[in-house]
Amino acid sequence: NVVVPNTFTWTVEFNGIAMVAGDLAGLVYYNPPTVGSSFNDWWKKTPEGWRPFESTDSNIRNNFFARVTAVPEPSVLALALLAGAMLVVRRK
């Protein structure tokens, strides 16, 4: 579990990928975003180093898929009820 602010940037790291022909890795395109927003570019590691890229196809937006699930923090009342229930169970 990771606590994040309302706005955040995420990255992906692929291990075991060599910079040789035939080794490929990537992310799933998913457009439009169901929540949030995305710039239409990404960074790609090339043999020369990291470079920004944009799609050459005007029909493709560079939105990659990631699933983030938000779980609200419990309220003070919920924590108090849970503590009370634990005390009752413990005394039995």
Image (cartoon, rainbow, N blue to C red):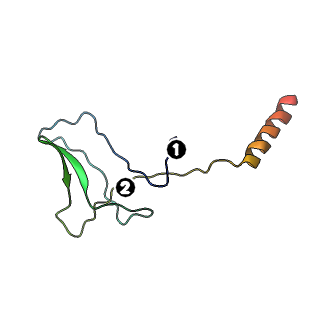
Quadrant in the picture for the C terminus? top right
Q: Residues within 10 Å of mark 1 (few under 14, many from 20)?
A: few
The quadrant where residue 7 appears = bottom left
Question: In the figure, is residue 79 to the left or right of 12?
Answer: right
Q: Residues within 10 Å of mark 2 (few under 14, many from 20)?
A: some
Q: Earlier in the sequence, mark 2 or mark 1?
A: 1
Name which residue type carries label 2: Phe
Query: Tag 1's secondary structure?
Result: loop
Tell me the tag on residue 3: 1
Measure how far apart labels 2 and 1 are at the Cα level.
20 Å
Q: Position of residue 5 (x, y in %)?
A: 49, 50
Which residue ends up furthest to the top in the rendered image? Answer: 91
Residue at image location 30% in from the left, 51% down from the top: 27
Residue at image location 25% in from the left, 53% down from the top: 42
Marks 2,1: beta carbons within 8 A? no
Q: Position of residue 50 (x, y in %)?
A: 19, 44
Between 35 and 9, the one nearer to me in the picture: 9
Between 84 and 67, the one nearer to me in the picture: 84
Name which residue type carries label 1: Val
Tell me the tag on residue 65: 2
Between 43 and 90, the one nearer to me in the picture: 43
The quadrant where residue 20 appears = top left
Question: In the figure, is residue 49 to the left or right of 8?
Answer: left
Residue at image location 34% in from the left, 45% down from the top: 11
Q: Is residue 34 above or below residue 24?
A: below
Q: Position of residue 52 (x, y in %)?
A: 20, 52
Number of numbered discs: 2
